[in-house]
Amino acid sequence: HYRRQLEEIRENAKEDKSAIYMKLKNGKKLTAEELEYLRDHDPEAYKEAKEIEAEQKRYEEELKKCKTKEDVDALKMTYLSSKMAVAKEIAYNPNIPKGAQMQLLLKENAKIKAAQEAELRFKSSSQYANLPTAEEKAEETEEKRAELRGEPEKEEAAIRAEEEKDREESPGTQEGEHVPDEVPEQRQSHVSAAEKEIHWIDLRDAAESPRT
């Protein structure tokens, strides 16, 4: 009886550990207890978890700066482009062993999944619900300018203030993040979500794709 209980305890502990690593792999937020376990038993995994957590927080801050629903999609496009660039650098580097390549790709993939989680939470928030579309924002700006027509100085001051506000609040590249070359799609800053749906990706595909 005692031996059976001991085996059950060991099996449960093994399942708990597996669950922690699965959450880490999928970019899920770890509890304080789970982070403490990694810190005490797997410092490298703990470091990776904190790195993923920090990047997710930066992505959340960038989401909060978005001023239209299209900005949210543009942010995702820029983020995914940067991650694809990183994946290619890893997958096509002959100096990185295949096993190490997969580990690096899995870490970047976990960051993508964490960003996806952040986006899902943001899109469920009242802040996102209250965001205008690019078309609605343009109409609102035009209405404000129309009210000031006939008063050139006020109109010019309002335009300058709006441009300055856009520069300060627009989402940007995260610190330390790889900046990819601009692609044609990124020049279209206001792509309607209905016209172009941007899907999240799995970086493990990069390791399995044929090299040319």
Image (cartoon, rainbow, N blue to C red):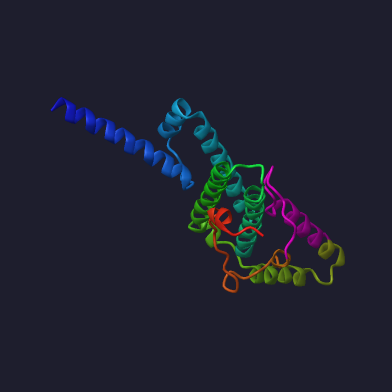
Identified at 48% across, 28% down, the residue is: 39
Where residue 155 appears, x then y in whole percent?
82, 65
- Which residue is most to the right? 153
- Which residue is most to the left? 1
Identified at 75% across, 59% down, the residue is: 162
Check if residue 160 falls in the magenta segment.
yes
Query: In this picture, which residue range is highlighted in magenta?
Result: 157-183
Residue 35 vertical position relative to residue 123 in the rendered view, above or below: above
Rendered image quadrant of residue 73: bottom right
Identified at 57% across, 73% down, the residue is: 194
Check if residue 200 falls in the magenta segment.
no
Q: Nearer the viewer, residue 198 or 133?
A: 198
Q: Nearer the viewer, residue 73 or 96?
A: 96
Where residue 74 appears, x then y in whole percent?
65, 61
Image check: 62 left or right of 31?
right
Residue 131 vertical position relative to residue 100 in the rendered view, above or below: below
Quadrant assignment for the N terminus: top left
Quadrant assignment for the C terminus: bottom right
Q: Nearer the viewer, residue 69 or 97?
A: 97
Residue 136 vertical position relative to residue 170 in the rendered view, above or below: below
Rendered image quadrant of residue 206: bottom right
Where residue 69 appears, x then y in whole percent?
60, 63
Q: Nearer the viewer, residue 62 or 25?
A: 25
Total number of numbered discs in the rendering: 0
Where residue 207 appears, x then y in whole percent?
57, 53
